[in-house]
Image (spheres, rainbow, N blue to C red):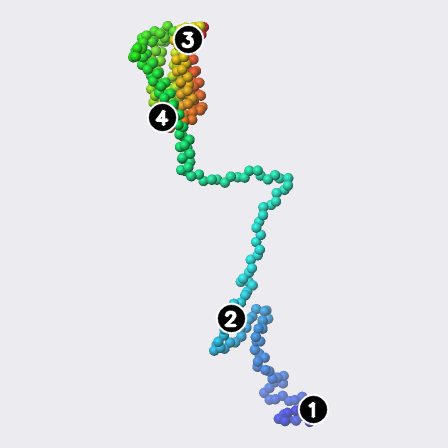
């Protein structure tokens, strides 16, 4: 008994079977399904994906959404940056920078307008300025035209010569005209520091002239005193230092509201001019 098939020719045990005609000797039976690529085979490099066969007539339920790590990454924890800690030896800043604050233009205007309102101060400056200007202008008109019981130009020139002034004929016109111009500027409130400085120079010369006419008898109260001339000098100094006020033609100039350096300059100029005219044109010691 042998394991040979009945269809195969007989041969001795141990002999190699003869190859069938038309078939190589090394040929063997191969299963055709062995040539198919198994499902899920990754390939040589792990990048090939084989899609399995699906029957188009078969109803397939929609696949559930898959989670992919690269598509939905969890955010990394965020750490709020902290300022570096200051060393113990470094003191902390005492003052912080103030943030700019927006100022409402209407509030700023109201504040400046409220500061500009000073009650009756400007009205008082108007009365002071006009009063001094009217007195000076009236004196100038008395000397120039002899109005209101004045002495006139001839008598005024003779009085200047008697006191000791040189060039009395020119000085009389300059003095009378200067008082009229200074008085008019004070009433109008125009070029007030200059006008008040000129008035101060005239008043100083007038007081020195009356003092030199009665030496050794300097008194303050009238009728032999000089209180009237001193009062006018004080009024001129007050106008120079305080300014003309709002009710004047100088209202838009700085010296009308906040006089400072210019007022001191005008005051010193007025005093210096009065003393210089006396020294250069008279030269007499008024108290000697």
- Residues 162 and 114: in front is 114
Residue 230 placement, left or right of 24: left
Q: Earlier in the sequence, mark 3 or mark 1?
A: 1
The residue labelled by disc 4 is 247
* Viewport quadrant of the N terminus: bottom right
The percent position of residue 154, horizontal first and vertical second, equals 31, 8
* Circle 2/circle 1 CB separation < 8 Å: no
Q: What's the mark number on residue 124?
A: none
Name the residue located 44 percent from the left edge and 18 percent from the top edge. Answer: 268
Q: Is residue 247 above or below residue 219?
A: below
- Assign a secondary structure to mark 4: loop
Which label sits on residue 13?
Answer: 1
Of pointers 4 and 3, the one earlier in the residue sequence:
3
Characterize the local packing of mark 1: few (<14), some (14-19) or many (20 or more) Cα atoms within 10 angstroms. Answer: few
- Name the residue tied to disc 3: 211
Mark 2 lies on residue: 63
For mark 2, give the secondary structure: loop
Q: Earlier in the sequence, mark 2 or mark 4?
A: 2
Q: Position of residue 261 (x, y in %)?
A: 45, 23
Work out how far the residue at label 3 is from the one at label 2, CA to CA, in angstroms.
125 Å
Indicate the secondary structure of the residue bearing disc 1.
loop
């Amino acid at each position: 008994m042998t394991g040979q098939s009945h269809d195969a020719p007989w041969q001795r045990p141990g002999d190699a079977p003869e190859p069938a005609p038309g078939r190589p000797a090394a040929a063997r039976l191969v299963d055709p399904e062995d040539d198919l690529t198994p499902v899920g085979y990754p390939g040589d490099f792990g990048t090939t994906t084989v899609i399995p066969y699906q029957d188009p007539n078969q109803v397939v339920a929609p696949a559930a959404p898959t989670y992919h790590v690269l598509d939905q990454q969890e955010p990394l924890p965020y750490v709020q940056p902290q300022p570096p800690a200051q060393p113990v030896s470094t003191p902390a800043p005492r003052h912080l920078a103030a943030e700019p604050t927006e100022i409402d233009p209407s509030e700023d205007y109201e504040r400046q307008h409220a500061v500009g309102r000073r009650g009756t101060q400007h009205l008082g400056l108007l009365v002071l300025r006009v009063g001094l200007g009217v007195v000076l202008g009236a004196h100038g008109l008395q000397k120039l035209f002899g109005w209101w019981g004045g002495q006139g130009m001839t008598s005024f020139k003779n009085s200047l010569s008697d006191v000791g002034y040189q060039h009395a004929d020119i000085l009389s016109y300059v003095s009378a005209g200067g008082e009229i111009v200074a008085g008019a500027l004070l009433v109008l409130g125009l070029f007030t520091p200059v006008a008040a400085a000129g008035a101060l120079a005239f008043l100083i010369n007038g007081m020195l002239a009356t003092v030199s006419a009665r030496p050794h008898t300097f008194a303050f109260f009238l009728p032999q005193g000089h209180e009237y001339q001193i009062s006018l000098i004080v009024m001129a100094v007050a106008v120079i230092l305080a300014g003309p006020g709002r009710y004047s033609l100088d209202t838009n100039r700085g010296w009308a509201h906040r006089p400072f350096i210019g007022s001191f300059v005008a005051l010193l100029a007025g005093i210096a001019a009065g003393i210089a005219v006396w020294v250069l044109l008279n030269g007499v010691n008024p108290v000697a």
